Image (cartoon, helix red, strand yellow):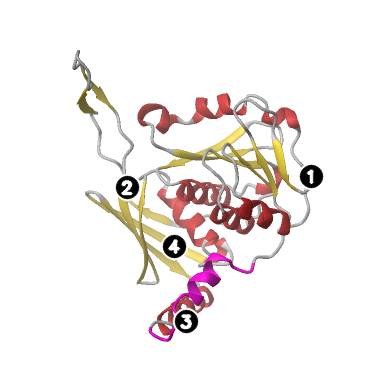
Amino acid sequence: MPRRTPVPVTGEIASPVQDGYTYVELDDAAAAGSAMLAEECALAIAYNGIGHAVMMVSPSAIEDFVIGFSLSSAVVESVDDIYDIRIRRSGDTLSADVQISNRAFWALKQQRRQLAGTSGCGLCGVAALEQALPQLTPLPSSSLPPAEHLRDLRTRIADVQNLARHSGALHAALYVDRAGEIGLCREDIGRHNALDKLIGALCRQGRNPRQGFVVITSRCSLELIHKAVRGEFATLVSLSAPTDLSVRWAREHRLNLIHLPHHSAPRVYSPER
């Protein structure tokens, strides 16, 4: 997954300075205060000039997000299929124009044709179901991380969640290296977005995701398992309990899946014991 040369990225995405928002407490004292809030904006992604997706994101580490989204959504098979990213901001909107290889662009257009061709024929849900339950290549089996690397992890995560500490309302995805240290943290209003940002950051920095493990602060649903497998992680740790389907898919695709409860020992759901 690591790229030999960096993906060229151009554009200005600086966020406006936020002074905080005033509020009044709803009680007899009616005390007034001010709070920083999580920033949110709309991001439109186009591949080779054709619009593909619009989503709400936090406007930080957008380059990482675009790369991670492209990989985890199977728009490209490799980061080497991404040639250039141009990002623009206008008020509360962002646009990302991504240049990808002819091979990846042809595959994307074929996918779009299949989706368009099913409407009105009684099979309109088939393509969507295929995307929801895609064929994924199982990972190589990997050993579980040492238990001591999970010790006090919740506290350590809180210490590095800089955006959430100031505004709240943000999920995080983090990479813990083979020494048990938190090496990367990416945050977003969307839990999928945070994981995409982390995948992109690992690619841009040339880090091997299998040499450590990844942590998500949200619940673990099937879509996050898809992204973890496509991101070639060895282990995914979730601070909230996984769904039954996510456990079954993790076991089937040899992704180590661990739930870290608030007041109990880590629970290994995959591999099955």
Judged by depth in the image, the label closer to the viewer, 4 or 3, is 3
Q: Cα distance, mark 3 to mark 1? A: 42 Å
Q: Earlier in the sequence, mark 3 or mark 2?
A: 2
Q: Which amino acid type corresponds to the residue marked 4 in the rendered image? A: Asp
Among the two numbered marks 4 and 2 on one chain, the one whose residue lies closer to the N terminus: 2
Q: Residues within 10 Å of mark 2 (few under 14, many from 20)?
A: some
Establish if 57 lies above or below 70. above
Query: Please, is residue 166 above or below residue 106 in the view?
Result: above
Q: Residue at x 58, y 64 (%)?
A: 78
Q: Is residue 230 magenta?
A: no
Relative image position of residue 71 (x, y in whole percent): 54, 61
Say which of marks 1 and 4 sits in front.
1
Callout 3 amino acid: Leu
Residue under label 1: 143
Q: Nearer the viewer, mark 2 or mark 1?
A: 1
For the N terminus, give its image quadrant: bottom right
Packing grade of label 4 (10 A; few <14, some 14-19, many >=20) is: some
Asked if the stretch drawn in magenta spans residue 123, the answer is: yes
- Disc 3/disc 2 C-alpha distance (Å): 41 Å
Q: Which residue is mark 3?
A: 123
Q: Nearer the viewer, residue 25 or 146?
A: 25
Residue behind mark 4: 84
User: Magenta residues, as a range?
Assistant: 120-135
Q: Secondary structure at mark 2?
A: loop
